[in-house]
């Protein structure tokens, strides 16, 4: 899993992951988390994701298997 920080036109930093097999596509993990889990994600930064621990990482892996 390759994690990245990126921003859109609004300039707000976001946490994302590069899709396996498609280095041109980044999944916005906070957005995907909200859509798939119907909950606020612990993904305000890469550091927050790291600190969230293995359960959060498992959710991210699942999101990347079937991104929105």
Image (cartoon, grey):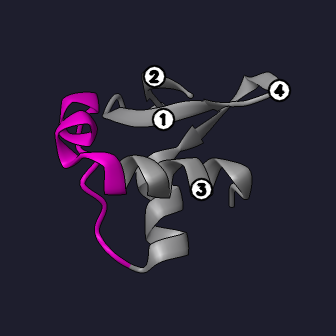
Judging depth in this view, the residue of 11 and 36 nearest the camera is 36
Q: Earlier in the sequence, mark 1 or mark 3?
A: 1
Q: Which residue is mark 1?
A: 16
Q: Residues within 10 Å of mark 2 (few under 14, many from 20)?
A: some
Q: Quadrant of the C terminus?
A: bottom right
Residue at 74%, 30% in the rendered image? 20
Q: Which residue is mark 4?
A: 21
Q: Earlier in the sequence, mark 1 or mark 2?
A: 2
Image coords of residue 31 (percent x, y): 47, 57
Depth check, mark 3 against mark 2: the one in front is 3
Q: Secondary structure at mark 3?
A: helix
Contact between marks 1 and 2 (CB within 8 A): the answer is yes
Q: Which contiguous range is marked in magenta?
A: 39-55
Q: Earlier in the sequence, mark 2 or mark 4?
A: 2
Q: Secondary structure at mark 4?
A: loop
Contact between marks 3 and 2 (CB within 8 A): the answer is no
Q: Which residue is mark 2?
A: 4
Q: Quadrant of the N terminus?
A: top right
Q: Earlier in the sequence, mark 1 or mark 4?
A: 1
């Amino acid at each position: 899993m390759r994690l990245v920080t990126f921003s859109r036109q609004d300039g707000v930093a976001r946490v994302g992951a590069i899709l396996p097999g498609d280095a041109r596509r980044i999944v916005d993990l906070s957005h995907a988390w909200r859509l798939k889990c119907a909950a606020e994600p612990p993904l305000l930064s890469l550091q927050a994701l790291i600190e969230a621990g293995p359960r959060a990482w498992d959710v991210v892996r699942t999101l990347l298997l079937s991104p929105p």
